[in-house]
Image (tube, helix red, strand yellow):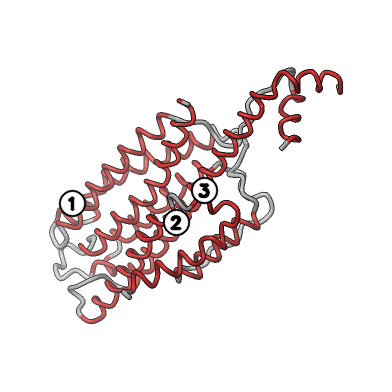
Amino acid sequence: LLGIVIGSCAAIEGCHPVVLISPYDATVESVLQGYRYSLNVLVKRAGGAAGTAAGTFDASKDAYVDLEAKIDGLVAQAKAQDQGVGCKLDDKTWNRIKAQFAKAAGLPASNPTTGDGDGYGCVTMMLSNVQQNLATLESIHKDPAQCVSKVPEFPTCLRPAAAQDIVNISNQTIDAALFVEHALKKQETN
Amino acid sequence: MSAVDDVFKALMDEAPKAFGAAWKDAKSFLPTELRKMALQLVSIAENVAKFEADDTQGYPPATGKALLEMQKRATENVLIAVTALTIIALEDTLNAVLKAAKGILGTVIDGLI
């Protein structure tokens, strides 16, 4: 601790605040809240309209393009603001946490992080997961084999049960990122 | 005990071991999220089983697999959020120490460099 304090003071004349995480960004919070709302509307509408023209992937294409643009923009912005501080949890600890939870939950194991990791900050990592979940959602929606439609002219859909689970999972993914933004906002105002 | 409770218990049993010293920061946020996760995992298993019994219900295994991938990322985000909270708390502590020690350390550092 003293080393960090002295380092922070020795680098430049006088002491400068220690930065371990990217600061609060009001844009991330507001865009992510809008993204959450739009995604919920899209998935609930598609799930409710499964088996009709309105429930097909094609009917939601524009909404997906809009969501992609929002999350791609947020990820790019977060990467640009990362300040090179990373999400500082050493690889050994992080891999241990991921492996233990995956085992307990019966989830597929992810590849261990090696070396210095990707160096991205916590917010970037979380937004990246939101981005990847959108890609998975689209792959479900556009795949006729996952719709098993009884209406040949509308081969793609989000089955109602899948739509409900997608909303729950997506919200948990997004809310974790919003939770951190709220904590950063609180830190900034204190 | 229901399947949700079983999964939740398994996750909660692992949490203090996995987080070690950071568990005290994680425990205010994590249990609620772990319960959501347990509910979700059980829902996926049930919906795949429903589909296999009647293909107008639930969803196919391919969707179950895709949803597990999504849940894995949601879980990762929850764990990153806990990590971030720990980092924020550490940053606050370090900066409070810096602020308190600024005058004294300034003199010490001037003497060292």
Give amino acid for label 1.
Arg
CA neighbours of label 2 inside 10 A, class few (<14), some (14 to 19), many (20+): many
Q: Are marks 2 and 1 on the same chain?
A: no
Residue beneath the point at 26% across and 42% down: A38
A83 sits left or right of A64 in the view: right
- Point out residue B102 in the picture as x, y percentages from the top left corner: 69, 21
Q: Chain of mark 2?
A: B
Residue B99 occupies quadrant: top right
Q: Which residue is mark 2?
A: B73
Where's residue A27, x and y in %?
A: 40, 30
Q: List x then y, in percent, for residue A49.
A: 14, 57
Residue B25 numbered tag: 3
User: At which x and y percent is residue A80?
Assistant: 54, 33
Neighbour tally class for label 3: few under 14, some 14-19, many 20 plus, Cα within 10 Å? some
Q: Secondary structure at mark 2?
A: helix
Q: CA distance from mark 2 to mark 1?
A: 24 Å
Q: CA distance from mark 3 to mark 1?
A: 38 Å
**Secondary structure type for disc 1:** helix
- Residue drawn at point x = 42 percent, y = 40 percent: A72
Return the disc, 3 or 2, that comes first in the chain's sequence: 3
